[in-house]
Amino acid sequence: MKVTFIITSLSLGGAETFICNLVDKLKLKGVDVSLIVLMGKNQIRPLDNINITYLNIKKSNPITWFMAIRNILLEFRNKKTDIIHANMFHAIILSRILIPFIPCKYLISSFHNNKEKSAFRMFLYRLTDKLSTINTNVSQGAVNDYLLYKVCSPKKLITMYNGIPLENFKYSKKARDTLRKELNLHDNDIVIINVGRFTEAKGQLELIHAFHKVHQKNNKIRLILLGDGEMKDRIANKIEQLQLKEKIFTPGFKKNISDFLSASDLFILSSQWEGFGLVLAEAMSCKLPIISTNVGGTTEVLQNNGIYALSPSSSDLADSLEFFLTLSIDNVNKYIEGAYNHVIDNFDIDHIAVKWIAIYNDLLKNNI
C-alpha cells in the first residue's frame, strides 16, 4: 500500500506534529509512505527515513505555485500512489484541484480545526468537496461545526482523533529538577505552562492578563509560554508592559516539550478555538492537572478530568486559575489520574495508526 501525504507546512503546530508521528508509525507497520510539504518553515520532520519533497511555495508568488503544480504532477506521473492523504487548507485545496490529473483514485481530506480563518476558505472547501473521496476531522465537535457550516456532505465526513507517542510524554523527576534549576525556580513556586504557536487562536495574550490578575494575589505562581509565532513581539511587549519579565518565561520553540511539562505544576490551554488540542493529551500523559477553554474538541480529549474556563476571556481564565489554587492535593490527584487513564486508553498514536490503516484498506476495497 502506497500512501502519499500532502501537508501545507512542517512548522510548529499540533497538526504538523501529529502527521510526523503518524507517518513514522505507518511506516513501521509496513505502509509505503511519502510526504510532500508545500511551504513554510520546516521546524519538525518525521523521525524515520521518510521520502520528503519540499516544494517551497511562497504564498504571494504565483511562479512558485505553478512550479509546485508542475512538480507534483511530474512526481505522480513517475511513481504510482494508491491514496493521497491531504492535510490542512492549502494542501487540501491544491490536492482537490489536481486529483483529476493524477493517476490516483482516492483522496482523503483531513481537516484539523473546527473552523477556518475566513468564510472564503470554508466556501472553497464546499465548492471542491466533490473531488474528495472522504473527509475527516479531529473531533466530533469539529465534525459538527463543519456540518453546521455545510462544508461537506455528512456521508463523507468522519471523526478521526489525533494521537501522541505515549513513550515520548512521561513525567521525569530528573528533567523536572534540572529544568527548574536552570530557570531559577524554587520548590514552592507554582509553575503554569502553556504550549502552542503564538497566534490569536491560542489566546496567550488573554492568558497573560489572567496570570497578571492572579499573580497580584499569589506571587508564587510563574508562567512558561513555550512556543513561537507571529505574535511573538506582541506577547513580549505585553509581558514588559505588565512588568512580568521575571515571572513569565518565553524560551521559544523547544523539542523537549516533555521536560518542560515535567517541570510544571499546571497546564493551561487558553485557545480561542481548537480542533483537537493535541498538547492537552501530551500534558495529560505527563500527569499534569489541566485547565482548558471549552472550545472545539477539548472536551472530548479532557472529558471530566480537568477544569474548564467558562469562556476564553482573561477574566474567566483567571477565575479558573484561582479555583484551581484552592483545590486539595487529593482533588488534584483525582483529576491527574482520570486524565492519564483517558489518554492511555484513547490517544495512543499506535492505536490511531491502526485505525488509519483500516480506513486505507476500506478505500482500496471500495468499502467507503
Image (tube, rainbow, N blue to C red):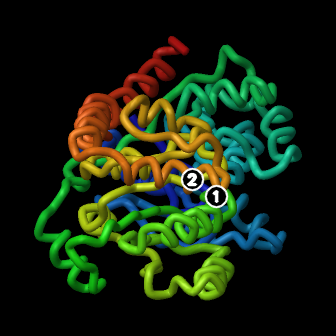
In this rendering, the answer to whether 103 lies above or below 148 is below
Where is residue 230? Give x, y as percent.
66, 74
Asked where in the image residue 182 lies, by quadrant, the reply is: bottom left
Q: What residue type is labelled 2?
A: Leu
Asked where in the image residue 86 lies, by quadrant, the reply is: top right
The residue that label 1 is drawn on is 314
Where is residue 361? Give x, y as percent.
41, 22
Q: What residue type is labelled 1?
A: Ser
Please state if 159 lies on the left or on the right of 23 as rendered: right
The residue that label 2 is drawn on is 317
Return the residue nearer the eye: 143 or 81: 143
* Residue contact at pointers 1 and 2, CB within 8 angstroms: yes
Please state if 260 lies on the left or on the right of 195 as rendered: left
Return the residue nearer the eye: 258 or 221: 221
Return the residue nearer the eye: 80 or 170: 170
Q: Which residue lies furthest to the top in this view?
A: 367
> What residue appears at the point 63 percent right and 23 percent down from the top-left corner?
157
> What residue appears at the point 40 percent right and 39 percent down from the top-left corner?
306
In this rendering, the answer to whether 76 lies above or below 198 is above
State the CA–CA distance, disc 1 to disc 2.
Answer: 5 Å
Where is residue 25? Give x, y as percent.
30, 44
Please state if 318 lies on the left or on the right of 174 as rendered: right
Q: Which residue lies furthest to the front in this view?
A: 217
Where is residue 146? Give x, y as percent.
72, 30
| Disc number for residue 353 | none
Residue 22 shows in this picture: no
> What residue appears at the point 69 percent right and 62 percent down from the top-left corner?
200
In this rendering, the answer to whether 207 lies above or below 294 is below
The quadrant of the rendering that contains the N terminus is top left
| SS for callout 1 | helix
Residue 345 shows in this picture: yes
The quadrant of the rendering that contains the C terminus is top right
